[in-house]
Each structure stands twice: as structure tokens, then as C-alpha cells.
Amino acid sequence: MRAVVYDGPRQVSVKDVPDARIESPTDVVVRITSTNICGSDLHMYEGRTDFEPGRWFGHENLGQVVEVGSGVDKVRVGDYVVLPFNVACGHCKNCERQLTNYCLTAQPEPAMAGAAYGFADMGPWAGGQAEFLRVPWGDFNCLRLGEDAAERQSDYVMLADIFPTGYHATELAGVQPGDQTVIYGAGPVGLMAALSATIRGASKVMVIDRHPDRLRLAESIGAIAIDDSQVDPVQVVLDETLGLGADNGCECVGYQAHEPDGEEQANLTMNRLIASVRFTGRIGNVGVFVPQDPGAADELAKQGKVALDYGMFWFKGQHIGSGQAPVKKYNRQLRDLIAGGKAEPSFIVSHELPLDEAPSAYEHFDNRDDGWTKVVLHPETTAV
Ligand SMILES: NC(=O)c1ccc[n+]([C@@H]2O[C@H](COP(=O)([O-])OP(=O)(O)OC[C@H]3O[C@@H](n4cnc5c(N)ncnc54)[C@H](O)[C@@H]3O)[C@@H](O)[C@H]2O)c1
Ligand SMILES: [Zn+2]
Ligand SMILES: [Zn+2]
């Protein structure tokens, strides 16, 4: 089968790799029909993780089941399914508590927790930017879709990661009806957090970024767009909230946060959130931070350390929630919002392309080129 293979920093190519197949009775094999490129792929693509050359990416996957193992009860050949990016067993201590983001069985390293398809340090699982994907613990990991699955793939595929992740940011931030919520980052995750805050009834959603195309998308769902290349974003948030700060905030950028001129500063968004959120407010941090970052611009960041304004954070009595999103905790309800016409996460999709165009799509998305807000790859259009 063909897959988007990582060859080294900023180099991917589409080539033949061993076929996905049933390896355990609880496995399912899915023919991938939609698979997204994610901001998390870019950390790996840029060589800012220890993702191994020769492996392939793809953790935002949707497709049709083509084979099920002998131990699979519920999932049937022909079902359209969307797969949480977290690979999870369903029966470990963490999975039992809905913490599928920290599954202890799917992560082979005993000192670690959590696994994902095609991801650095998240277990051996192959990615889905390929024609087929092996899904372990198929009954647990497959979320089945309804009759509109094939036509509405560009909505449903967002259930694999970014819609639940954006929702998780608002859950960690405790967004309630009437709240004023600030979101740093208008990439796909930030835009999904803005959509989620709106679904939860926020009265005012403020989204900060510097890319006009992304800010326009935030405005298209009713958020206030704040361009931090033009204004001081913290001051604008204070002005919008009677000087008190937002009720809560979401960090949707991560360790490669930078100034509009490109200068990286890993603490930039977290410290701006501490300044933008009111006393006792909550902050949901889903943007990725890493324990080591040898490619970072400064010494502290190389060691995975972030100079947090902890004094102000403590003084204001704020809370931070962090980490990978437990997709399975939310994906069923969010699926039903899509099915019921209450949410249309595909509004961020800018490109739907065959797998062969992945190398140039990675380049454009990595450059945050104007108009490249979210890429959905359709491997079946390259199948022979
Ligand atoms: N926790 C999870 O489960 C989870 C899941 C998916 C993605 N992520 C992470 O979420 C983050 C965002 O993902 P994405 O796909 O939206 O990525 P992206 O890179 O496309 O978007 C990030 C956006 O942040 C903006 N940005 C950079 N510095 C900024 C600053 N100082 N202030 C405001 N905006 C700034 C960029 O201009 C960009 O538009 C990444 O770190 C990704 O790895 C986490
Ligand atoms: Zn993702
Ligand atoms: Zn588990």
C-alpha cells in the first residue's frame, strides 16, 4: 500500500510500505477515505521530535472497514468509522476512567502513558496517511457513522482529533453559558475551540492569531478576531472585558509559539493567557509542549522548560489543565451534533487532495501559506 513516509526534516514522500493487516483477533483494518494533516504532524515534519525516518504519519483518520479480526463483535465490514487519534485498549486503569489519552496498554514504554497512530513517542502504531490502517482494539476505538458518512466525510473526519481537542480545551477551561472566552491560536485546533466555546454558550469568543485567512474563519463563526501583529492582544482582551480579563482561556498553539516576526518563545501564549484571563479563571492548554526540544531557539526551551509567570498565575488563583485530548470522551456527542446539523467543523477545510499531493501540501501547510487552513487527503483517489 502507499503511505506518506517521513524521510527527514521537511521531507516526506509517498511510497510503498507493508500493507496494514490483522495482527491480533481484536484488530480491524480500515480502508482510509479521509485523513488530515495536523499541526501536530508539523512538529514531526520539521524535525522537532524524535519521529523515526521511514515511519509514516496520519492520526486523523476516517474510512471503511474492510476486515475484522475473529475477536471483533460490533464493528462490521462495510461500516464507515472514524478513529480517535489516541490508540487505547479500553480496559486499563486510565481507559476505565475515560483517560484514553493516557492508555497504559497501547504505550509499550512502561514509564509512559498514551499512544497515537503515526506519532513520535506514542507507541509503534502506523499512521493513516496511507491506503489502509490497522486499528487495534477495534470495537473500542471505532466510532461508527451513519448513512451520511460518505458524503459528509470532511465534517466527520474532524472527530478523529481537532473537534474533540478543541472541545477538550473548553472543557479544561470550564467554559459555561455566558462566559467570555479567549483563545490563542486560530489554527485548526483554535478554530475548533472557538466553535466549541460557542456550542457551550459563550457570550463572547476572542481569537488571537496573525494570519488574516485564519482570523476570517474565526469571524465567520461569530468570534472576535484579534491580530497580534497589529495590536497588543492582552490589552484588547482587557478592553473587551471591562478590564477584568476573560472568564477563561484556551492555549491552542504549543511550544513553537512565536512572535509575528517568527521569533520563537515557548512561554509567549501561556503568559499572555495568564495576563488575559481574570482572577480565578481557568486555562485549557491543548497546544503541545515537549519534555525536550533540542531544536529550540534558547537553552531553557531545549530542555523542555518554560519560564511561566507563576507568581501572577498564583496571585490570580488560576488553574491550568493540560495534555493530549481524550477524544473518546467526546466524539460520540460531537458526532451527533454534526449529524443533527448543529455543528459543521468542515468550515476550516481549505484543500481536499489525493495522497500523492501530500508532499506539497505539507510544505504549504507548514509555511502557513495564505489559504492553507486545513488539508484533507483522500487516499482512495490514488488507489489503482
Ligand atoms: N492536545 C491535543 O490532544 C492536541 C491535538 C491536536 C493538536 N494539538 C496541538 O495543538 C496545536 C495547534 O494545532 P493546529 O493544528 O491548530 O496547528 P497550527 O500550527 O496550524 O496552528 C497554530 C496557530 O498558532 C498561531 N500562533 C503562533 N504563535 C502564536 C502566538 N504567539 N499567539 C497567537 N497565535 C499564535 C499560528 O499563527 C497558527 O495559526 C499544536 O501544538 C498541535 O500539536 C494538540
Ligand atoms: Zn491532529
Ligand atoms: Zn488503556
Image (spheres, grey):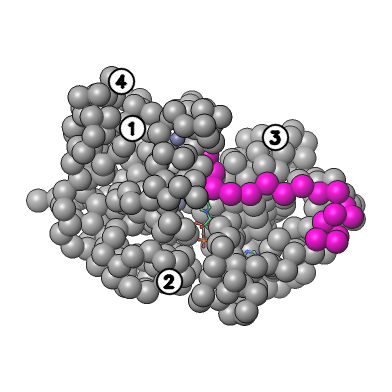
The residue type indicated by label 2 comes to Glu
Q: Secondary structure at mark 3?
A: loop
**Mark 3–mark 1 distance (CA, rounded to whole Å):** 35 Å
Query: Which quadrant of the figure shows ligand 1?
Result: bottom right
Task: Tell me residue 53's x, y (percent).
Answer: 30, 67
Q: Between disc 2 and disc 3, whose residue precedes? A: 2
In the picture provided, is 188 more to the left or to the right than 144? right
Q: Is mark 1 within 8 Å of ligand 3?
A: no
For mark 2, what is the residue? 46
Over which residues does the magenta segment extend? 310-326
**Mark 4–mark 1 distance (CA, rounded to whole Å):** 11 Å
Q: Between disc 4 and disc 1, whose residue precedes? A: 4
Q: Secondary structure at mark 4?
A: loop
For mark 3, what is the residue? 201
The residue type indicated by label 1 comes to Trp
Residues packed near mark 2 inside 10 Å, few (<14), some (14 to 19) or many (20 plus): some
Pick the front one: 183 or 68: 68
2 vs 1, front mark: 1
For mark 4, what is the residue? 74
**Mark 2–mark 3 distance (CA, rounded to whole Å):** 37 Å
Residue at the (49%, 37%) spot, across then down: 100
For mark 1, what is the residue? 137
Mark 4 touching mark 1, by CB under 8 A?
no
Q: Between disc 2 and disc 1, whose residue precedes? A: 2
3 vs 1, front mark: 1
Task: Tell me residue 199's x, y (percent).
Answer: 63, 35
Q: Secondary structure at mark 2?
A: loop
